[in-house]
Image (cartoon, rainbow, N blue to C red):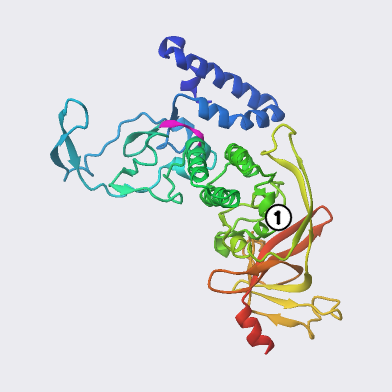
Amino acid sequence: MPRRILRIHEAETPGQFEVFIEDIYDRVELFADDEGDKIEQIAEMPRIYNQACVTIVAARSDRATRGFLHEIYLIKTTRLAVRLPFRCPDQEGTLGSVYITYIEDSREPDPIHFRAWTLQERYLSNGYLEFGRIQMRWTCASSGTQDGYCDGWKRESSVHIPTHVMFIYRELQQDIEDMNSRGSSAEWIADWIRRRWDAVINHYTPRKLSVLTDRILAISGISQVFGSHMKDEYLAGLWKSTLPSFLCWQVTSDENERFPRPIDYQGPSWSWTGINGPVNFILARACDQDCRAVLLDVDIKPVNAHAKYGSVQYGILTLKGRLREAIWHRNSTGDSLELRTRRDSKVNNADEATTMNFITVFPDTNDFKEGSKTSESIEVSLFEIGNCAGLKRRGPVGLTTRLILAQDSHVWVYFILIQDYLKKTG
């Protein structure tokens, strides 16, 4: 804990904040003493943020020791500011002033927008006071969706913008009530909620974590709130009703920007929580309407039985579908796949194999050794999930699996462009 917080005295704090400071002490002791208590306290984050009077956001600081109350110097960037009279929207019609200016890099995110843990405090709070590098601003659930103009008069209209705020408690409930009043079907509402969840994951996964094993924990509060509305079973970052099509999530970063495969267990290999880096569900949604595989069974064991949205010890899926052996040829310039025939017994014996250069492979990690430029040939299995019915193209989509140990395997996504397949096979 920063020394300044630990030295706070009662005389310095209003009455309502005395309980807050005592709560900090209690939670720090729990976090330090017991891992199980830590997980249970993390599960309480939605309630804590939702019931807070205000959440103070130190957006301008990249670490706790830097502080956030220093002066903001805008002399250089506001030297061309123009002062204009402004009639305030109060009952008295007070006459004030506004300053119009151009601030360079005003849309650049603050350090807090790159941290994974801080996404929850923005989404789960009902109001927060943000100390940014350019300005201080107050945002609450009553005005957040309307007051989108700031720092250059550009409206924040997309959840993909790092500084965008989605007040989950208020917005989800209000939107669901509106859809119910319009007579929307339960299927429509469920799909709408899932799309909001997809947007949150797109926003969350590019953010950074100091402890990579916190990937599932740092979003568990948001998961809990969505779960209360979806009435669905949460499976280590995915929802049971979306499987098996949503197993086709994909990492969106380039090969040289992908993270290496985690050393410590973060989650099942079939879940985005098991790897690091930004992910999306574009292919998953594309094959959702024509899903061929069938989910037979799920076996997941959470680390803490009272925190079902937290870390898991293991996750096993049993699926039924079409499987085909293949050889994945990897090199520094690209990937290709060869389908294996029954007479192929070794990786090097590919005389009767069919080269599948039109199969696009989306690896979830960078498994090349640092500095290595050599080619690799890896035995894999292609498991078909469904048929792509969007993206202006059509073809099978599925998982490329590689068995490592009996209790672990690597899973990533492939996509076959059907037009090229027809040309290849005549």
Residue 120 in the image: state x and y as whole percent. Answer: 53, 38
Which image quarter: residue 385? bottom right
Q: Nearer the viewer, residue 372 or 135?
A: 135
- Can you say which quadrant of the picture contains the C terminus? bottom right
Q: Which residue is mark 1?
A: 270
**Residue drawn at x 60%, y 81% as measured from the top left:** 419
Q: Is residue 67 above or below residue 361?
A: above
Residue furthest top as drawn: 11
**Residue drawn at x 63%, y 87% as measured from the top left:** 423
Task: Tell me which amino acid carries mark 1.
Answer: Trp
Residue 299 in the image: state x and y as whole percent. Answer: 79, 47
Indicate yes or no whether the magenta region holds residue 45.
no
Image check: 246 left or right of 339?
left
Image check: 152 left or right of 282?
left
Q: Give the magenta-colored segment's residue range.
A: 124-128
Which image quarter: residue 259? bottom right
Residue 87 in view of the camera: yes
**Residue drawn at x 45%, y 49% as measured from the top left:** 159
Residue 325 in the image: state x and y as whole percent. Answer: 79, 72
